[in-house]
Amino acid sequence: MHADPRLAVPADLHAIETIVRLAYSPYIARMGRPPGPMLDDYGVLIDNGRVYVAERDGTIQGVLVLIPERDAMLLDNVAVAPAAQGTGLGRRLLHYAEQAARAQGYRVIRLYTHETMTENLARYARIGYAETHRAEAHGLKRVFMAKPLD
């Protein structure tokens, strides 16, 4: 059983960077460049209290980055270690993101993903996210989605 996610601390940096690299590397060939999450500065995000980690058996297996914005919580990144993929951890992290957004008073959670990550687009649509628009940012063709929170 996975424990609830906890706020990341600086000592978690290496594990976080490793999970992000392993989770996103398969998309490099498809996209022709590293996905945005591979370029983020996780040290700064940890220092700003934006990163959560999920552990199993004392090992970090999942990463969640939440960025509070004016009108919505941005689910900036969710990544699961390859060994933990298919265990429901990603689903639990997405659920936790929604709980955290509600707890901070948000009525909407939003995210974006690269248009070539079709598996993610389908996964988010299945759990209630709807596409709001598409745009190019930093040379990346992104699909923006949002989900109302009850």
Image (cartoon, rainbow, N blue to C red):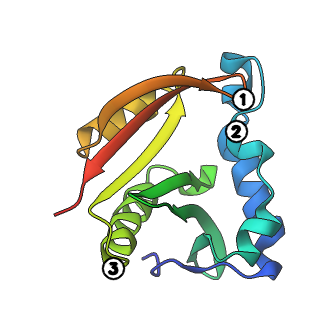
Residue 46 spot, x, y in % from top left = 72, 73
Closer to us: 74 or 52: 74
Vertical placement of 71 versus 11: above or below? above
Amino acid at pointer 1: His
Point 34% across, 31% down: residue = 132
Instruction: State the image quarter where residue 27 is shown.
Output: top right
Query: Which of the marked residues, 3 or 1, is nearer the chain's N terminus?
Result: 3
Q: Residues within 10 Å of mark 2 (few under 14, many from 20)?
A: some
- State the separation of the CA atoms marked 2 and 1: 9 Å
- State the separation of the CA atoms marked 3 and 1: 31 Å
| Residue located farthest toward the left when viewing the structure as drawn | 150
Amino acid at pointer 3: Ala
Which residue carries the number 1 mark? Answer: 138
> At numbered mark 2, what does the secondary structure look like: helix, strand or loop?
helix
Point 25% across, 39% down: residue = 126
Which residue carries the number 3 mark? Answer: 103
Query: Which of the marked residues, 2 or 3, is nearer the chain's N terminus?
Result: 2
